[in-house]
Image (tube, coloured by chain):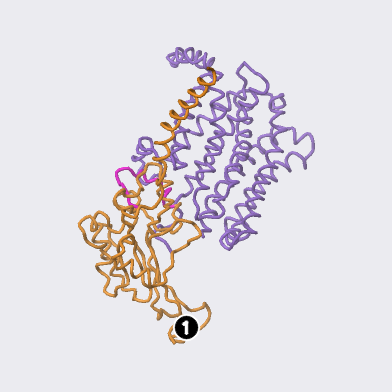
Amino acid sequence: MGLSEGVAWPWPIAVYLFLAGISGGSLVVALAIRFFKGQTETTPLYKAASLISFVTIALGMLCLVLDLTNPLFFWRILVFYNFTSVMSVGVIALCVYIPLTAVLCLYAFEDEIKSIPALSFLLPIINMLKPVRKPCEVTALILAASVCAYTGFLISALIRFPLINTAVLPALFIASGVSAGAAASKMLSVFLFKEDMHSSELKILHGAEWPIMIAEILFICMIAMSLATGNAGAQSAFEAFTAGVWANLFWIGVVGVGFLGPILLNFATGKTFSHSAKAFYLSGFCAISGMMCLRLFILYAGQTYAI
Amino acid sequence: MSENIERRRFLKGIGAASLILGPMGCTSVKDDNEDANKPHYVMVFDQNKCVGCGECKEACNVANNLPDGKSRMLMEHQSGGVEGQACPHCGKEECNCERKFVRVSCQQCKNAPCVSVCPTGAAHKDPKTGIVTMDASKCAGCKYCIGACPYNARFINEETDVADNCDFCLNSKLSKGELPACVQQCKYDALIFGDANDPTSYVNKLLAVKDSVRMKPQFGTEPSLRYIPVVKLGV
């Protein structure tokens, strides 16, 4: 029995966790490949990732603000700070990260901006920012990973909920953010920026997909095992995996769609199908929907089983 | 000669180091230690005396100008019976005959999770009294404190759109030198309030002789609300 009714953080927060994860994940992937391969040109993957990271984090902020009891109070979070609060530290990171994603978009779309006369006012800004491109990208890479992790730290501070209050959550959110971010940016790079589906960059992504997925599965198993073998509170929270609507969401959404979907599409079908555009998009959507289900599951099942 | 310079330098170094480290050492001490000169307000809920009349809730509503029907506390009705078995008092399967209640309200933790997670410092400890209270003008309504509270004792005030908690009527009563509204209202002496750091206070003497418990001590929050539980059914 308590004074608040329902869950403190409803679905818009799950959507925010999802969007922030995709935003950070796609930038991590694109920038890591850029540094790893020593690229200096703007690749389709870079374009797709910078666009996704900016749009999704902007939408995520919208979710966050609309979930406040009074959205007009959002300025208070920007004015007052408390450094023992994960949220406050995250706000500082986001205040740097969001403008940086916009700057990366400017770098990525320089040619497109040049061709649109209405946007020519941006050109002097782009020229001004060009000398600091490398430091901007390095900072963006660090902050992108931090934003992914931050969404995990943010909710793992809720000590009342054993499923949420685990040390592994930030790692799980980084892994699932990177896998969904990679899926989103590779689909957009092929769909919008005419990247070849079998280019060397996308090959790297394909190869990285499976180790990341294994890491995700491992992290989820770690959470489940720590609950199953934990104290009474943890054991009652383990029910989240075995009974009720959230268990269905977990087994169908996270495991079925998110993990088995891409595995079956890639390994259980013939070579012609698994290399086709259909399989490419389908498995991408599976990865992204699986991640959304994971965020929903963690947030709702987590808040359902309180100590 | 060179030995002398070495010694001089050594003495200078000692002097400089002590100048720097001395004040640092002095300032960092006693930061977290409990200061006995400061009050530590505690409330004791005596389950043996509470009859569940609910007048404390009404008094809370009036004293703190809360929306209709809302108060900063709840009374949880506990039935001692085992589900599916007949009540030991009246013999019925389902009854409300046992008057056993628990006060649900802010536990006024010494180590308050709501204060540490609040991104704006709206949920804070009043510096003078150490009471966990709200600065409504800073609260952004993010509900982080509500999720972080291990006791589910915080809520959104629908009128002000900001988070709210029981702060022992800090601004409505304590500041005027009165007792919290619920304590004043209770006819059965089920609520006792006072300063535990004051050796002469009634609450201090009571806690010295009575066994009391704190809710969910495993969280390490060190609540200031104490409960004197009913330990056994009648003879």
Q: Going 25% across and 63% down the picture, which residue do you hit? A: B181
Could you tell me residue B222's position as x and y percent? 43, 58
In this view, the residue in front, B19 or B131, is B19
Residue B40 colored magenta? no
Q: Position of residue A35 (x, y in %)?
A: 64, 22
Tell me the purple chain. Answer: A
Question: Residue A268, percent across and down?
Answer: 77, 42
- Residue B72: in sight, yes or no? no
Which part of the image, by quadrant, shows the C terminus of chain B?
bottom left
Q: Is residue A196 above or below residue A81?
A: above
Which region shows up in magenta? B132-146
Q: Position of residue A275 (x, y in %)?
A: 74, 32
Instruction: Identify the chain of the residue marked 1, using the numbered disc in the image.
Output: B
Regarding residue B170, the answer to whether it shows in the image is yes
List the single residue furthest toward the front.
Answer: B1
Q: Quadrant of residue A291?
A: top right
Chain B on-screen colour: orange
Name the element at disc 1. loop
- Which three-letter amino acid code belongs to the residue tagged 1? Cys
For label 1, the residue is B87
Residue A176's quadrant in the figure?
A: top right
User: Which residue occupies 51% across, 24% down?
Assistant: B7
